[in-house]
Image: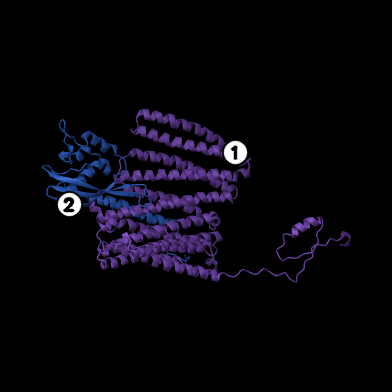
Chain colours: A blue, B purple
């Protein structure tokens, strides 16, 4: 490597620390503004579509509204079983506890990757990105496929989802 | 004296550690109880445990520290002792690192509350309390260190201890700043590129913001501190400062290259019609956020640190700094060469597959993704190697240890690759000639083509570096001839010793020197 006399024109005499501070402030402002701007322009989830139902479910889980999230699950997943019959994988009270247990921690970013529909069935692929100890990115992503089916009340989630996945 | 110092500062350091752990946890537990997070029994348990630690740590630290301060004020030697400096800078480093972690947490939770990604108000209060306690103790010891420096010069071991602290914290702060900025840029990019598909924002932006701002604070403070006289003049030629700079530079170069490689790979693969290069699905523009952010942030850091190092080197680069620079340059050249070699061999391998498989009536398979990847490696490795490697530098650089290490490492890598690929090629050829059981399929021919690809690259690189080694040996200046002393005769008169001792001393003369020893009566002088 050769040390050329590399100088940025017009910046001679400026304390370089302030240049970095200026750049960082601009970036911080961009981060805050973009998040606030996109939040305010977002519409309410459209429950007539599979991706709208998944959106409503994720938002309900992240804001601790367990009853609202529970209401978006399919009857097959939530119905209490009769005697001798296999029951649902999780009861409503357990579900409520799971939602509350993961409240308070830093929430994950959830992004819809794709949504496919075939008759009364649909699948929505979402990417869940959480903060992690990854040195480079500070985050780790996983893809979750959510299955839905059309019921009389509209689209409902049939996948056995653990609420903590979206926290 | 040294035993007393050791005792005082070890006890002071341990008791201060106990005090800090006790104080931060006592405050956190109290805040949890006040804000209704803890139950009453948990509060009592914590008070008992951390209260005991605090009540033992505080008086022990106070007693020992007051004695140490009193001794330092009475005896100037005590104030400038290396052990005292060690204590002060270890405490400064420990409290600064812990305060950085608490501050980062405070900012992350604070921004999270503001932006609605978390609702844990108690976490903000806990982090604030921890930050206040640690910053207070750090500030107190920072002033102690400044007062000690004012009283006596900080040289030798003491100055080295200060540099370890300062440049360690600079490195930590810069890492927080760069990774935070990279992560924030990525999150903003994803939001702008794919905001409509983002159904929950999460806490990634607050976390990145917190990391970046904490890094700015830690780095900014220590950068300005070390940029002031007399520290600047004192440190400019220090090896630690150069090591810190080159570590950041090496990391920035590596990460900028990784970012550029990924970007180029995605672009090439998409150009060749691959829909999901490297398995990346969804919006490609959003997928580019990570590599593009890495490239932008670390390329800027690369330019910045290079400029700082150039300013430090100036006209009078110290010998050890030059050594660190050469080591860095040759290390980057070696990595670049490896990247270039893998890219070139991989391209030839893919080309060989593409030519031989159709000839043998075999399915070519997916080649465009591999071609994109290996082209990227070759395109990134080649300019890096060309800019860092100088085949015939000036004489001062030509016979350095790091250059010879680079040359031998490159030669070793080439020879090893040649050996392994040569063995595979010969095995496949012998199998074909002898019609062995596993040579019946056409895979043997394809394997032979792949081995030939690796051999070609290994031979080219091996020959190039072998020739350079020979050229370096030929250019090495001949050893200076021994000075001739023929014709010169020295007469030395020695008094006050005996012949045996003088003969013992004369045995230390270089080979070829001749002498005769003659004893004279002192009355003749």
Q: Is residue B123 above or below residue B408?
A: above
The one of B425 and B260 positioned closer to us in this rendering: B425
Q: Is residue A11 visible?
A: no
Residue B321 horizontal/vertical position (percent)? 53, 59
The one of B107 and B254 positioned closer to us in this rendering: B254
Badge 2, how many Cα within 10 Å: few under 14, some, many 20+?
Answer: few
Report whether B355 appears left or right of A149. right
Q: Which residue is painted at 47% across and 32% down in the image?
A: B53
The chain containing the residue under callout 1 comes to: B
Q: Is residue B138 visible?
A: yes
Q: Which residue is painted at 55% across and 67% down in the image?
A: B396
Quarter that holds the C terminus of chain B: bottom right
Q: Which residue is mark 2?
A: A116
Q: Give yes or no for contact between labels 1 and 2 (Cβ–Cβ under 8 Å).
A: no
Q: Which residue is painted at 40% across and 64% down in the image?
A: B422
Report whether B35 appears left or right of B160. left
Tag of residue B7 = none
Q: Are marks 1 and 2 on the same chain?
A: no
Q: Residue furthest front?
A: B434
Tag of residue B70 = 1
The one of A28 and B322 positioned closer to us in this rendering: B322
The chain containing the residue under callout 2 comes to: A
The one of B392 and B45 positioned closer to us in this rendering: B392
């Amino acid at each position: 490597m050769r040390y050329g006399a590399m100088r940025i024109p017009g910046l001679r005499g400026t304390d370089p620390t302030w240049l970095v501070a200026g750049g960082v402030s601009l970036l911080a402002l961009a981060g805050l503004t973009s998040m606030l701007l996109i939040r305010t322009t977002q519409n309410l989830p459209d429950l007539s579509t599979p991706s709208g139902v998944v959106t409503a479910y994720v938002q309900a889980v992240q804001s601790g509204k367990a009853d609202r999230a529970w209401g978006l699950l399919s009857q097959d997943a939530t119905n209490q079983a009769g005697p001798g019959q296999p029951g649902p994988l999780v009861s409503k009270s357990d579900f409520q506890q799971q939602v509350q247990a993961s409240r308070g921690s830093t929430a994950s970013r959830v992004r819809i990757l794709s949504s496919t529909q075939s008759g009364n069935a649909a699948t929505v692929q979402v990417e869940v990105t959480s903060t992690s100890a990854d040195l480079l990115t500070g985050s780790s992503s996983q893809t979750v496929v959510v299955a839905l089916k059309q019921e009389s009340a509209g689209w409902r989630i049939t996948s056995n989802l653990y609420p903590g996945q979206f926290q | 004296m040294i035993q007393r110092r050791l005792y005082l500062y070890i006890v002071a350091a341990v008791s201060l550690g106990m005090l800090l752990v006790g104080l931060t946890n006592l405050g956190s537990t109290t805040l949890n109880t006040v804000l209704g997070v803890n139950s009453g029994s948990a509060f009592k348990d914590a008070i008992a445990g951390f209260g005991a630690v605090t009540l033992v740590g505080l008086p022990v630290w106070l007693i020992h520290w007051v004695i140490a301060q009193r001794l330092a004020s009475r005896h100037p030697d005590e104030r400038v002792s290396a052990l005292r400096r060690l204590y002060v800078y270890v405490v400064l480093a420990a409290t600064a690192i812990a305060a950085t972690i608490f501050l980062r947490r405070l900012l992350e939770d604070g921004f999270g509350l503001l932006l609605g990604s978390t609702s844990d108000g108690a976490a903000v209060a806990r982090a604030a309390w921890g930050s206040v306690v640690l910053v207070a103790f750090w500030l107190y010891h920072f002033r102690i260190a400044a007062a000690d420096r004012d009283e006596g010069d900080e040289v030798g071991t003491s100055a080295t201890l200060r540099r370890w602290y300062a440049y360690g914290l600079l490195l930590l702060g810069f890492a927080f700043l760069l990774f935070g900025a990279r992560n924030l840029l990525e999150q903003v990019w994803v939001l702008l590129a794919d905001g409509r598909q983002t159904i929950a924002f999460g806490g990634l932006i607050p976390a990145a913001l917190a990391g970046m701002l904490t890094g700015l604070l830690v780095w900014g403070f220590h950068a300005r501190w070390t940029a002031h006289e007399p520290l600047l003049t004192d440190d400019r030629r220090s090896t630690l400062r150069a090591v810190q700079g080159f570590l950041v530079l090496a990391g920035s170069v590596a990460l900028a290259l990784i970012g550029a490689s990924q970007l180029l790979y995605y672009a090439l693969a998409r150009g060749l019609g691959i829909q999901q290069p490297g398995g990346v699905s969804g919006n490609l523009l959003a997928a580019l956020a990570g590599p593009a952010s890495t490239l932008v942030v670390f390329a800027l850091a690369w330019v910045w640190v290079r400029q700082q190092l150039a300013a430090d080197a100036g006209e009078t680069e110290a010998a050890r700094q030059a050594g660190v620079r050469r080591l860095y340059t040759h290390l980057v050249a070696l990595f670049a060469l490896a990247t270039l070699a893998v890219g070139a061999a991989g391209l030839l391998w893919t080309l060989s597959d593409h030519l031989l498989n159709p000839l043998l009536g075999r399915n070519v398979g997916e080649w465009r993704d591999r071609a994109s990847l290996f082209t990227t490696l070759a395109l990134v490795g080649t300019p890096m190697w060309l800019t860092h490697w100088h085949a015939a530098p000036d004489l001062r650089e030509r016979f350095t240890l790091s250059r010879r290490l680079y040359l031998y490492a490159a030669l070793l890598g080439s020879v090893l690759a040649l050996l392994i690929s040569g063995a595979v090629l010969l095995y496949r050829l012998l199998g074909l000639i002898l019609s062995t059981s596993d040579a019946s399929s056409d895979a043997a021919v394809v394997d032979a083509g792949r081995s030939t690809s690796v051999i070609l690259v290994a031979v080219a690189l091996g020959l190039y570096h072998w020739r350079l080694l020979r050229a370096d040996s030929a250019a090495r200046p001949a050893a200076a001839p021994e000075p001739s002393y023929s014709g010169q005769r020295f007469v030395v008169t020695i008094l006050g010793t005996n012949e045996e001792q003088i003969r013992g001393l004369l045995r230390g003369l270089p080979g070829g020197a001749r002498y005769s020893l003659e004893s004279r009566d002192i009355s003749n002088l």
